Amino acid sequence: MKIKLPRIFLIILGIGFLINLLQSYFTPLIFDEAYYWHFASDMAWGYFDHPPLVAVLIKISSFFFDGELGVRFMSCILSTATLFILWCTVDLPRKKEYAIHFFVLAYSMTLLNAYGFFTLPDTPLLFFTALLLYVYKRFIEKPDVLWGIIMGVTMAGLMYSKYHAALVIIFILLSNLKLVLNKYAWLSVCVALLCYVPHFIWLYDNDFVTINYHLFDRPNDPYNFTKYTLGFFVNLVAIFGLTFPWIYWGLFKTKANDKFTRALLFLVYGILIFFFLSSFNRRIQTQWIIVINIPLIIIVFRFIMENETAKKWIYRMGLVNIIIILYLRIGLVYEPMSPIYYETHGNKELAEDIQAEVGDMPLVFENSYRGASMFGFYTGNNTFSLNNESYRLNQYSIDNSEATVQHQKILYLSSRSSDADVSFTKNDRRKIYGKYIDNFESFRKLKTILEAPINFNLEQEQTFQLYNPYEFDIDLSKLKFNVAYMTDFKIVKDKLPNKPTLKDPSISTIKAKDTLTYSFKFPKPRKLKEPKYVRIGIMENHLNYGINGRNTKVE
């Protein structure tokens, strides 16, 4: 199909692309981008927090540029392509008269601006959502082998972007249940699953660490209406800014007159209902619902071509949004213009201060995958996040970063001032403290295994297993153990030392890839009288206790 683009469309699209390139070049990384840059330093079919596509984008970007643009270049490409695809998806001939309104609508959406240059999993998620809607539109017009294969590859791209992309696919399917009888739709599913096999294999090889963490081991809080449900509704306003009344008006006025419009509505309402219900269980992050921007651009753009009032107010308020957003974007680069201290401020300068102090010495951060990745990017030093029981597992828990800092003199960085040898001050006046360790040695990959469910009896002897996944033996005298008691929400309330007994007391080392059995009794809780989950942690060489076991349910 030949696509003829209005000149004004190409000009504005090109200007937007150039602005994003400049923003990418001059804006220091945010912490999440640095974390995903760390992903890309060791390419794999999966990572602790997300599927691998965000790392692929960064890796490709690094072939073209260094520095921040070497992280963000592909995001600039994808965000531009997303708007191009959305324009092509709207088939109304008179849309060329509304090209400026199209861009005012799109560029006024707050987070959509951010994902125009930031490299985050939502960047490819938005692109592949737009592409899937375009492909699905063509598929329902002409279902055949070609469009079936293209749709399957697109669905795989979605799932390689972010796990909750499954919601996009599910709600499109629910909008047209006759697809279950369509052989070409089944071809799409088969192609998508075939493309996704490498990630399934990675999950299996890594004990489904990502799934276990997000679904079972992640701490939560008791329900709080203001923080959870009210916060969800605040997010519904925040993602659109001042245009939100007219955007939702356009949504409510749109009827499902055809299969494609029905898919758009199912996608928007499905996402909103799903996360509204989820808000009774957890805090909904703004970016979790950003995918509704894609179908809403199509819905609302068609609406403003039919409704003069909506066109006028979205144009006016959209321009105000854009001015505010541009001001905030300048503030990301130039701190004096920023109304708040943002995470793009000061990290590069702090990294330079640290590097001036230690040179190329490895850096170990206490409970900070954000710090480890950010300062790894800006200093080039080997970095590692030593995660203890007060934090959470992350990519540093499963990759090879720990090995790069072993048995070396390192600077141990934390927010604690005790025994500090040096200190550094951030732009926001907070301090980070450093302590030199001459021969750093950690074993954070040691695993403690409790059989579930646990019979919590203080008098009864229990057992757990210790597994050594390393390629070397470990002296057991270097290890100490504790028991963490948790609430229903997996929040640690008690952390108590424990002295388990080896089943074979003659053993002094745990061999590589070997498992030992310990017996122990639960220590008496101090704060939590009836723990709901327990976990065995390990301290090595007087470091803080780690997260070495799964949260195991108590009977």
Image (cartoon, grey):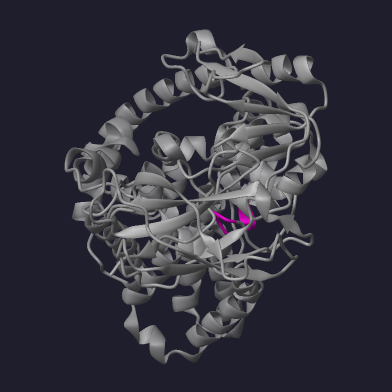
Q: Percent from the top left, x then y, of residue 497?
A: 45, 47
The residue furthest front is 506
Q: Where does the image place residue 382, in percent across and percent down from the top left?
A: 77, 36
Q: Is residue 479 left or right of residue 327?
A: right
Residue 207 found in image quarter: bottom right
Q: Position of residue 486 (x, y in %)?
A: 33, 52
Say whether residue 53 is magenta. Answer: yes
Q: Which quadrant, please, contains the C terminus?
A: bottom left
Please state the extent of the stretch shown in magenta in the rendering: 48-54
**Does 97 appear above or below 429?**
below
**Most foreground residue, 538 or 319:** 538
Question: On screen, 422 above or below 490?
Answer: above
The one of 42 and 91 positioned closer to us in this rendering: 42
| Residue 139 appearing in the image | yes
| Vertical order, 32 against 437 (above or below) | below
Q: Main secondary structure of the magenta part?
A: loop
Q: Is residue 74 magenta?
A: no
Residue at 77 percent of width and 60 percent of height: 473
Tell me what residue is drawn at x 33 percent, y 82 percent.
177
Q: Is residue 255 left or right of residue 472?
A: left
Which picture quadrant has residue 340?
Answer: top left
Q: Quadrant of residue 166?
A: bottom left
